[in-house]
Image (spheres, helix red, strand yellow):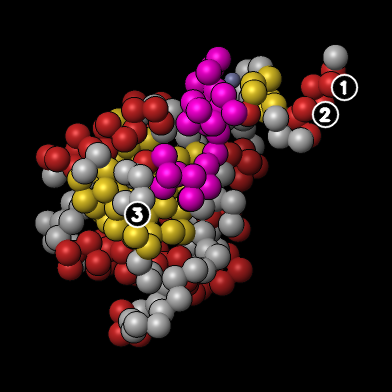
Amino acid sequence: MRQVLDIAKKNGRWTECPSCKEVIITKKLEENMLVCPHCSHHFRLNAAKRIELTCDTDSFVELPIFISEKEHGDNVSLAQDEAIKGGMAKIQGCTCVIGVMNFSFKGGSMGVSVGQAVVNLMRHAKKVKKPLVMFCTSGGVRIQEGIWGLLQMLRTAQTRNMMGNVPMITVFTDPTLGGVSASFASLADIMIAEPGSRIGFAGQRVIESTIQQKVPPDFQKAETVLSQGFIDQIVDRRHMRDTLAYLLRWV
Ligand SMILES: [Zn+2]
């Protein structure tokens, strides 16, 4: 029996939940927005899937966010493999600017290109006077880019300050760490998290080796972060569209 399950898991028809170890039919899991029907574990999503699940059908229009505004022209190519996707979209009829980070590309890390994309999304939101919704997931700054990577924290935080009264909503998804949680992600007007997401600055292992102590199991979990007042709400993925639409009607 175990061998049959292994074969089914290998070809993708079955998926094992990493939290409760239940084996779920992949199609059923996808129908449930990649949330485990047994324990509500939220599986990680890539940017394209997140957009598909969040935005109204065919409403997402990608923006040329990977270049500076001065370079905008008619022949701009939109397709770029990066840790973020961004554009204009509608959520239950409410128009917004949306940015979705992609953990599967270099751990969703923020380098110069991602920083520029975030800055351009913020500038665009200000220009069209529409709220900005950011789905964040990141291991932090793209450390391979050295000081240029770190500089993106400053740039995004500075641009966020210049957005005036254009509202911004952040959705923390698993995991949001390092320079992303420590810059623009935590500067939103409303901060939401998916259940069980890890939100913090330095990772658990780094802290444990620094203080030479074990940290509690719920350390950096969204529920703990909420209890400490750092975020506003935890929302199940299956209710995310309703919640965002509700908020977008108010902001
Ligand atoms: Zn489960």
Query: Which residue is labeled 3 in the image?
Result: 60
Q: Position of residue 241 (x, y in %)?
A: 31, 35
Callout 1, which amino acid?
Gln
155 vs 124, left or right, is right
Callout 3, which amino acid?
Phe
Tag 2 and tag 3, C-beta contact below 8 Å: no
Query: Which residue is labeled 1 in the image?
Result: 3
Label 2 beta carbon within 8 A of ligand 1: no
Name the foreground residue: 100 vs 138: 100
Dot placed on the residue nearer the N-terminal end, 2 or 3: 2
Ligand 1 shown in quarter: top right
Name the foreground residue: 13 vs 188: 13
Query: Which residue is labeled 2 in the image?
Result: 7
**Residue 227 in view:** yes
- Could you give the CA–CA distance between mark 2 and mark 3, rounded to whole angstroms? 37 Å
Q: Is 219 situated above or below 141? A: above
Q: What segment carries the magenta color?
A: 27-53
For label 2, the crowd category at 10 Å Cα-Cα, with few meaning under 14, some 14 to 19 and many 20 or more, is: few
Q: Residue furthest front?
A: 58
